[in-house]
């Protein structure tokens, strides 16, 4: 049996979030807001904590700085029972951090410092531990500079994903992409990806395509087993190599903050894999996790536990 249910490698960040953001005050002025919080976020960080909340035995793999933000991120991960033995810290590193300004409609412009996400490196001596999981998640390709860069014929991210598949793990992938120039780093890991889970905006930026089916087929042709496009308020689209494809609508909720919604979706999807849900139930459960995330301020805020998410999935109305 694998040591972990879920190993989540990549982008871990410290977020400070304020709500509702309405304007930047002129000069040295002040605008009052109703709420302020801090959260562990990022394509790997949000997924790690949300998965742990829902009962998965989880390993965090990434890097933080030797600063107060890094101290807090590690303590917060441990609070939820996450194994942090493979989180790296080195002198001179700074924790990847964001100031997130959340508007009343849930959208959230942000100021971000890249930090240790670009510096951490998983060498071959760590492969046995980090891939000893039922599900191995790589979150943040495009931001993990040291892991994205080629060392010889391929990137280190690709080597870890290949090792994870060889060890028997199911692999999931999320990315940070804004244009087709980001495709080479993503292409490195696609042949070792069972489930590719980009946002529709990222997928379209990489491919230049607009049709969901064509976009998914582009990535299937590059080696992934299945593509799951997160569509924001329009739900999610699933398409796999066997020809199965469907769209799941979004849940009808009052959105507070969309920060981390796609990353929470990744956690819900991993729970579905561990629980052996069928594809449609798996995507619906991931949608429920993402929707709950959006009901609170900050990543994972609305995610409580597995039973709460399952009940929400079964009872909450979907959008028309």
Image (cartoon, helix red, strand yellow):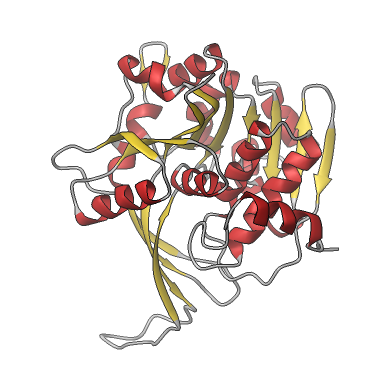
Give the x, y percent position of residue 311.
73, 56
Q: How many marks?
A: 0
Image quarter of residue 81? top left
Give the x, y percent position of residue 200.
66, 46
Residue reaching furthest left?
Answer: 91
Position above or below: 199 against 314: above
Residue 292 horizontal side relative to residue 252, left or right: left
Image quarter of residue 17? bottom left
Q: Dividing the image into 4 quarters, which one contains the C terminus?
A: bottom right
Position above or below: 192 against 35: above
Residue 34 horizontal side relative to residue 29, left or right: right
Q: Pick whichever, 120 or 58, lies toward us.
A: 58
Residue positioned 49% across, 36% down in the render: 57
Residue positioned 77% across, 35% down in the render: 279
Give the x, y percent position of residue 134.
56, 25
Residue positioned 36% across, 11% down in the render: 152
Q: Pick whichever, 308 or 166, lies toward us.
A: 308
Q: Pick whichever, 301 or 55, lies toward us.
A: 55
Q: Dividing the image into 4 quarters, which one contains the N terminus?
A: top right
Q: Is residue 96 visible?
A: no
């Amino acid at each position: 049996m694998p040591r972990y249910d879920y190993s989540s490698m990549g982008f871990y960040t410290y977020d400070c979030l304020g709500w509702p953001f309405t304007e930047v005050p002129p000069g040295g002025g002040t605008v009052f807001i109703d709420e302020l919080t801090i959260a562990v976020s990022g394509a790997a960080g949000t997924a790690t904590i949300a998965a742990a909340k829902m009962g998965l035995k989880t390993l965090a793999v990434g890097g933080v700085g030797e600063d107060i933000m890094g101290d807090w991120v590690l303590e917060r991960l441990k609070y939820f029972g996450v194994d942090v033995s493979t989180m790296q810290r080195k002198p001179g590193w700074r924790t990847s951090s964001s100031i997130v300004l959340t508007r009343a409609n849930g959208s959230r412009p942000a100021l971000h410092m890249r930090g240790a996400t670009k510096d951490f490196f998983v060498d071959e001596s760590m492969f046995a531990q980090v891939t000893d999981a039922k599900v191995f998640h790589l979150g943040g390709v495009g931001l993990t500079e040291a892991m994205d860069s080629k060392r010889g014929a391929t990137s280190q991210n690709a080597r870890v994903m290949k090792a994870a598949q060889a060890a028997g793990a199911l692999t999931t992938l999320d990315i940070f992409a804004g244009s087709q120039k980001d495709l080479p780093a993503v292409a490195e890991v696609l042949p070792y990806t069972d489930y590719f889970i980009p946002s529709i905006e990222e997928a379209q930026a990489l491919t230049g395509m607009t049709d969901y089916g064509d976009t998914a087929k582009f990535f299937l042709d590059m080696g992934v087993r299945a593509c799951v496009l997160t569509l924001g308020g329009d739900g999610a689209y699933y398409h796999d190599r066997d020809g199965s494809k469907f769209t799941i609508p979004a849940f009808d909720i009052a959105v507070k903050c969309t920060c981390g919604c796609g990353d929470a979706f990744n956690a819900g999807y991993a729970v579905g894999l561990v629980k052996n849900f069928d594809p449609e139930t798996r995507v619906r459960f991931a949608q429920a996790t993402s929707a709950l995330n959006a009901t609170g301020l900050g990543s994972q805020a609305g995610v409580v536990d597995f039973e709460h998410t399952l009940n929400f999935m079964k009872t909450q109305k979907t959008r028309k």
